[in-house]
Amino acid sequence: MAAVNEIPALGVPAEPQAPQGVRGLRASQRRRLNAFRYVAFTIFGLFFLLPLFAMIRFSLEGSKPGTWSVAAWKQIASYQGPPPLLPAIEITLELAVITSLVMLVLVVPTMIWVKLRVQWFSRVLEFLCLLPLTIPAIVLVVGLAPIYNRIERYNVSALMLFWAYVILALPYAYRALTAGLTAMDATTLSEAARSLGARWFTVMFRVIAPNMWQAILNALMLTVALVLGEFTIAYPLTYVNLQVELFSISRNTVNAGVLFSASAATLLVAFALLLILSYVGRRLRRGRP
Amino acid sequence: MTAAATTETGARPPRAGRRSAPTWVGTVPFLAYTGVFLLLPTGIVIWNAFRRPTGGFTFSNISALNTSAVRTLFVGSLELCVISALIGAVLGAILAYAVASGRQDGVVRRLYLAGSGVLAQFGGVTLAFAFLATIGPTSGILFHASWFYDFPWGIALIYIYFQIPLMVLVFLPAIDGLKVQWREAAENLGGSTWHYWRYIGGPLLTPAFLGATLLLFANALSAYATIVAWEDQIAYVVPQQIGVALISEVGLVNFNQADALAFGMIVMVVIVMSGYFLLQRRAARWQR
């Protein structure tokens, strides 16, 4: 007790002088640092925002330069080409749904099962899930070409792209789901459920999965964002999705307004998805002490 | 504690006895899927890189890469990756430092982090269009850049757009790992800002910086959509030529060129990523 009181007592007379000097130095450093930060944020902010603004401004360009018009945005659904845009949009949206569903069915149960029952497998699972980050998509597509030759014997629809898209989305889904799985005490939850007589099926789908719905939502949104922007697999395999069609339009009609409005629209959807995601993610983290 | 553990182990055997299939069976669907659509394609690339179109083992696909045209492609890829990775890494590190020196829960930090998450993924066809609208040689709103279609600087500028955010995401944890106490200790011992960065901050951040630069390099190496949308008539880098070889492969013209080029890329990526993991492990030492 005495010792604790002694230290502030000793410190009091020194305080007005020493920290004053330090604080003065700090203040000048702070000022320089703040000046640097504002300059950096302004320059980088401009660099990142200008192309986005330019694209949106371009999409709102009227028939005469300098005028404004929403014609290009209305065209998104009605653009007749060549090539027409709407079928590609439909295919891409369907692909987004199918890819997300397959991802859910394939990855979520596997990850929960491995976490609960087959822990020795978790390193293999992690390796396989993160491998697509290392192997460039343009390399993967070379190996996928012969496989897609086989698939095309049965079905030539561009919807078949989902087989490859699930692989591309694996790393993002894996990270999102891992965050969800580690944020809860899955082992205790499953032991509690089991001791109350639950089957493993019940444990996985009615106990663990509902506890990680935010992580599952994250994984879904990342998958959708990925499918909306995918070009590398579709184009060399001569499938047509939204990005491939935009590319074809750009080669047929230079600077077509619909190009920029459709690009901006895709981007805005992806932005919205990922911003929702970062918001949900923050709430998820904040919820955990 | 001990009692609970005993009950736990005591309860297990009957359960284990009741189950009909071993637990690893649950991983079979996943293994089958990734086997067919991830491991098999990779295997096919490596296998075909050493196979004659007519069958049989050969090095001729690989040695066919040693022509001036293909060498130009690999040199082009190297140029573009080195330029965009170095500039992206330096600028990204500066931005990461600016972000890190602010308040931990400040609006600016949240904004830049969320933005980086989005923009690091924002590549592809759309990004090329965005730059076309900004500084395109005939359509630019900001100005008309005559060098827009110059290789490597025109495309490097576009690549830097997604390299900087990636650098911020990868490098920020390293900067956050610098403890205030280290700086205070340096100041208390009479060190200047220069001393701090030269002898403490710099050496601590170097492995993380180099590792992140390698990651950016690999990122630029595998980018495909952006450069195709930027220029699809001339192949400057390996991915472009792989695409060309693959599309013309419909007529089985030069069957194994795509595989040999892809194999070359796998080798490059494996070298770069090994370096990344080694450096990352070294960098992780100070990030607790």
Image (cartoon, coloured by chain):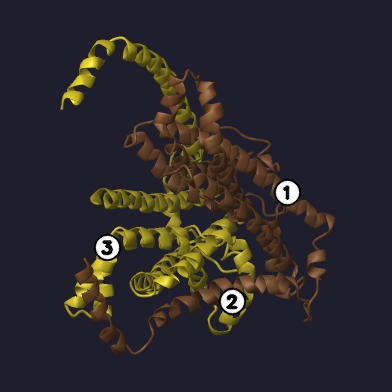
> Percent from the top left, x then y, of residue A3?
20, 24
Q: What residue type is labelled 1?
A: Gly
Q: Mark 2 points at which residue?
A: A148
Mark 1 and mark 2 in contact (Cβ < 8 Å)?
no
Residue at screen point 53% across, 63% down: A132
**Rendered colour, chain B:** brown
Secondary structure found at label 2: helix
Give me the C-alpha separation between circle 2 and circle 1: 30 Å
In the image shown, does B162 or B97 lie closer to the viewer? B97
**Which corner quadrant holds the N terminus of chain A?**
top left
Determine whether the residue tagged by mark 3 lies in a helix, strand or loop. Answer: loop
Residue pictured at 42% horizontal, 43% vertical = B115
Identify the chain drawn in yellow.
Answer: A
Choose the circle earlier in sequence order: 3 or 2: 2
- The residue pinned by badge 3 equals A185
Q: Residues within 10 Å of mark 3 (few under 14, many from 20)?
A: few
What's the residue at 35%, 58% (across, down)?
Answer: A179
Query: In the figure, residue B103 lies in which quadrant?
Result: top left
Q: Can residue A171 be seen in this view?
A: yes
Residue B262, percent from left and from top: 68, 64
Q: Residue at x 39, y 44 (%)?
A: B114
The label number, if any, that marks residue A177 in the structure image: none
**Chain where mark 1 sits:** B
Please check whether the numbered discs 3 and 2 fall on a single chain.
yes
Q: Which residue lies under the disc numbered 1?
A: B76
- Residue A217, compared with residue B116, is above or below; it is below
Relative to A251, residue A93 above or below: below
From the top left corner, tell me how far across and down residue B258 is, in percent: 71, 66
Q: Give the amino acid at mark 3.
A: Asp
Q: Nearer the viewer, mark 2 or mark 1?
A: 1
Q: Nearer the viewer, mark 1 or mark 3?
A: 3
